[in-house]
Image: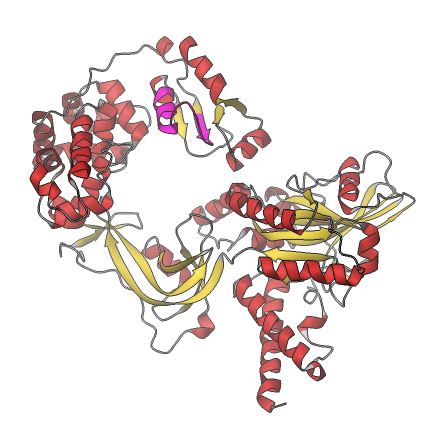
Amino acid sequence: MSSSIENKVNSLKSAIEDYNYQYYVLDAPTVPDAEYDRLMKELIELETTYPELISKDSPTQKVGGKLDSTFQPIIHLTPMLSLDNVFSSDDFLAFDKRLKNRLERDEKIEFTCEPKLDGLAISIVYRNGILEFAATRGDGKVGEDVTHNIRTIASIPLKLRGNFPSLLDVRGEVFMPKSAFEKINKDALEKGEKVFANPRNAAAGSLRQLDPSIAAKRQLAVYFYSIGSAESVELPNNHYQRLMQLKSWGLPICPEIKVAADESECLSYYQRILQNREGLPYEIDGVVYKVNSVEQQQLLGYVAKAPRWAIAHKFPAQEELTKLIAVDFQVGRTGAITPVARLEPVFVGGVTVSNATLHNMDEIDRLGVQVGDTVIIRRAGDVIPQIVSVIENKRPANALKIEIPTVCPVCSSDVERETDQAIYRCSGGLVCDAQKKQSIKHYASRKAMDIEGLGDKLVDILCDEKLVDTVVDIYRLPRESLIKLERMAEKSADNVLAAIEKSKSTTLPKFIYALGIREVGEVTATNLANKLLTIEAIANASQADLEAIKDIGEVVAHHIVSFFSNEYNKNVINELISVGVHWPEIEVLSESEQPLLGQTWVITGTLSQMSRNEAKQQLMKLGAKVSGSVSSKTHTLLAGESAGSKLTKANDLGIKVIDEEAFIQLLPSF
């Protein structure tokens, strides 16, 4: 054995110990879980090959981290162990085969499957049904006393129900629901305070507050997943029934837990949970499989830090390390200049990522990121990848500070920063090609003029070929010019032209929205149309007239006045009308004809008899405001098929929920 291998092992031990301290004690991890897992796996492989290098202080020989001296130590009644991981279906099948070999059986093994919650492991002891104390995992043998904070969690009973044991040591995972995490970070940003990197950090930080009133405000939750020990009660002989026993005593259990008859059903469960991951109201990073039979669990036994009868099947990492190699600045439809990170390609969240959003210069300052930095990149589901944090101790000497350009990267017009805002804008307006393209794309989009087939790529080509310079040119496109474009056959060209012709018949709210006036969305466009009735009245409205309209404040009113004060914009509107764009007169509805006036509705899931946009238009016609998120101000949730976290939150808040059939039945009565 060479000294380089011994040095490598020592280097891995040192790095992992540092990361353990940051993760378990400081609640401030500096690397993503995927990087930690890789280092741990590499150390395990080296120690397996060279067992003489295994030492008592190796991180492979313990469960967690050191204790924080701020909290009183508590010795666990039974050790709190961790789980080994697998990262692929093949690895899990190999695990299943090992179980069968150890049990000396060929029959299928039944498993209990559950989501692997991304929170903080907790042990709670109930004596004679009364909560006595609670402790974190700590080093597996001794944890930290967090009883004062655990008592503030609404879902944890202070007294058990039913025929409970005289002594119960129960294990669970404390976590912060996504909705609570979003709120706590939003509040922190408004106060100029530090935000949490993820819900796990937020949950851990909340449990380690000395003042329980702080933890009480954080809306923590818990799901219990096993029994450490129980006295004076006969427990069921399989794991799933034991969980149901916990539920009968009043302890919350994850509703996604299922029994799998064999290894193939386990893998099907993994795929289902992975697909539904974003819809769950809490963060998870994999699933856990546990042999269901308690007798088989006892036969299989334990290794030093983990049971042989359970394994965690981790999801593809949502966070990874990579390097920031450059920052480009893109110009949007309204002239907003947005920094975009160019990254060394990295596989994260199931795809290879090479770009990430940086939002604005304030975000760059908050992160303290520079070109050349090693950064943690996060991609969750369909969310645009973003830089979470910077590994400052890996910053190279030649790292470059990121500066906002003084002139537009597209048209070279001056770049201006809006007063009291983080946004920089190109001052070139429609002179800027980037804004032209984005304006045309917005005009043709589904919620605006809904010109099917006129997507982003075709708009880019039409602008680059000088066939379209303004939205009016869309209606003057020659068929022969379209046909000549690459990948545009006669039938495709005819379909696009037919969609363009169809778009001439629209509604005033859609037309106003399509114009792309800053901060005028669908709701504001509808309010403008319903109040002022004609495009002429809207164009001539004063600042005071506009501010008198519901949901239109000083800033939005200013944007509307500015838009219609521009002669170029007026000419575009007149030309659009001259080429045939039209809409029916708006009927003036009384309040009695708008029965949903003042109500806020939310739509979620898949509707089968109408599109969500059609349902939205119906609701707005009846006076309702349609929001994208559920809150205490929501009046009703319209829930279609496969409704996810919004439905869960609505139920938690006691908000009225109706399905599509009930909604359709209501429409004639309005």
Q: Nearer the viewer, residue 477 or 146?
A: 477
Residue segment shown in magenta: 601-618
- 661 in the magenta segment: no
Number of numbered callouts drawn: 0
- At horizontal 84% and vertical 33% (from top left) the residue drawn is 162
Q: Residue 253, how many percent across, how many down?
A: 70, 41
Q: Residue furthest bottom?
A: 2
Q: Reply above or below: 31 against 448.
A: below
Q: Reply above or below: 196 against 534.
A: below
Q: Nearer the viewer, residue 611 or 510?
A: 611
Q: Residue 265, how many percent across, how many down?
A: 64, 46
Residue 251 in sight from this viewpoint:
yes
- 617 in the magenta segment: yes
Q: Residue furthest front?
A: 106
Residue 661 vs residue 213: left or right? left
Residue 542 in sight from this viewpoint:
no
Tell me which corner region of the image, top left, top right, bottom left or bottom right, holds residue 67.
bottom right
Q: Reply above or below: 281 against 416.
A: above
- At horizontal 86% and vertical 39% (from top left) the residue drawn is 164
Q: Residue 143, how many percent across, how many down?
A: 74, 60
